[in-house]
Image: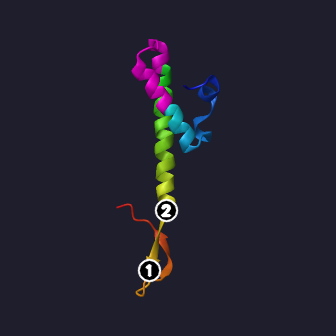
Amino acid sequence: MTTMANEKTAISAMSFETALAELEDIVEKLESGKVDLESSISIYERGEALKKHCEKLLKDAEARIEKITLKADGTPSGTEPLDPG
C-alpha cells in the first residue's frame, strides 16, 4: 500500500513506474470500500493527477521513439521520427 511518504511526493518528480505503482495502490484502496468518504475523494484526486502524469510520460516517450530507415539493399540509412498515425 501507499506510504505517507509517497503521498507527499511531488507527482511531477515521479518516474512512470513509481507513479503507476501508487496509482495501482489507490485503485486497490478505492475498490476495497474500506476508505472513508473524505479520504476517498482525496486519494481519487491524487489518482487523477497520477494518471495524467503517466499519460504525459508515455506521450513524451512515444515522441522520442524513432524508426530506423533502410536503404534499398536493406542496410540502415538513418532514423526518422516515428509516425504515430
Element on which disc 1 rests? strand
| Residue type at tag 2 | Ile
Q: Quadrant of residue 72?
A: bottom left
Q: Quadrant of the N terminus?
A: top right
Q: Position of residue 69 (x, y in %)?
A: 45, 76
Which residue is pictured at 40% across the width and 22% down the height? 31
Residue 66 lies within the magenta run? no
Q: Farthest residue in the left direction?
A: 85
| Residue ID for mark 2 | 65
Q: Which stretch is magenta?
A: 24-41
Where's residue 7, x and y in %?
59, 26
Which amino acid type corresponds to the residue marked 1 in the rendered image? Leu
Q: State the predominant SS element of the stretch in magenta.
A: helix
Kindly identify the residue that appears in the image at 43 percent across and 22 percent down: 30
Disc 2 crowd, CA 10 A, few/some/many (<14, 14-19, 20+): some
What residue did someone put label 1 on?
A: 70
Residue 63: image x %, image y %?
48, 59
The label nearer to you, 2 versus 1, is 1
Location of residue 66 with respect to 55 vertically, above or below: below
Most foreground residue, 81 or 21: 21
Q: Specify the color scheme.
A: rainbow
All told, the count of numbered labels is 2
- At mark 2, the secondary structure is loop
Sooner in the amino-acid sequence: mark 2 or mark 1: 2
Name the residue at 47% across, 83% down: 75
